[in-house]
Image (spheres, helix red, strand yellow):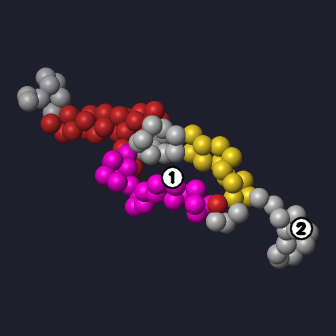
Amino acid sequence: MEPSPGLDAGAEVEAGKRFAHSANRWYKRSRGMSKLWDIVDLLGGYPFEVARPEAVFDFFRSRGFQLEKLLTDGGYGCNQSVFLQEHSGATPKTSGKQR
């Protein structure tokens, strides 16, 4: 690629840096996150473990919760569940200082 007429190589490098910086600011504003974090997410992000819905339901049911609402996404993960805890009628204990 040949340099543009009227600009020396140093000026073109500086213009390229300004363009890259401007493009990164635009990307962050439009996406809400930087390109770096998008790349981290693309490569796997934080480690996580997949659980079958039955395992999640059994876990909460064994601890006194009842499924109130479920939204599924059709098999690609990110199911949303709302569980409510069944009350035994006992008054909850408070810990720490009373205000």
Helix, strand or loop for the magenta stretch, by majority: helix
Q: Position of residue 61 (x, y in %)?
A: 64, 60
Examine the structure image and report whether residue 77 is included in the region drawn in magenta: no
The dot on residue 53 is: 1
Task: Pick whichever of labels 2 and 1 is earlier in the sequence.
Answer: 1
Q: Is residue 40 above or below residue 10?
A: below
Q: Which residue is disc 2 drawn over? A: 91
Q: Position of residue 91 (x, y in %)?
A: 89, 67
Q: Is residue 51 left or right of residue 97?
A: left
Range of magenta residues: 38-60
Mark 1 neighbour density, 10 Å: few (under 14) some (14–19) many (20 or more): some
Q: Position of residue 26 (x, y in %)?
A: 41, 33
Front-lying residue, 52 or 22:
52
Task: Name the image quarter holding residue 62.
Answer: bottom right
Under mark 2, the amino acid is Thr
Q: Quadrant of the N terminus?
A: top left
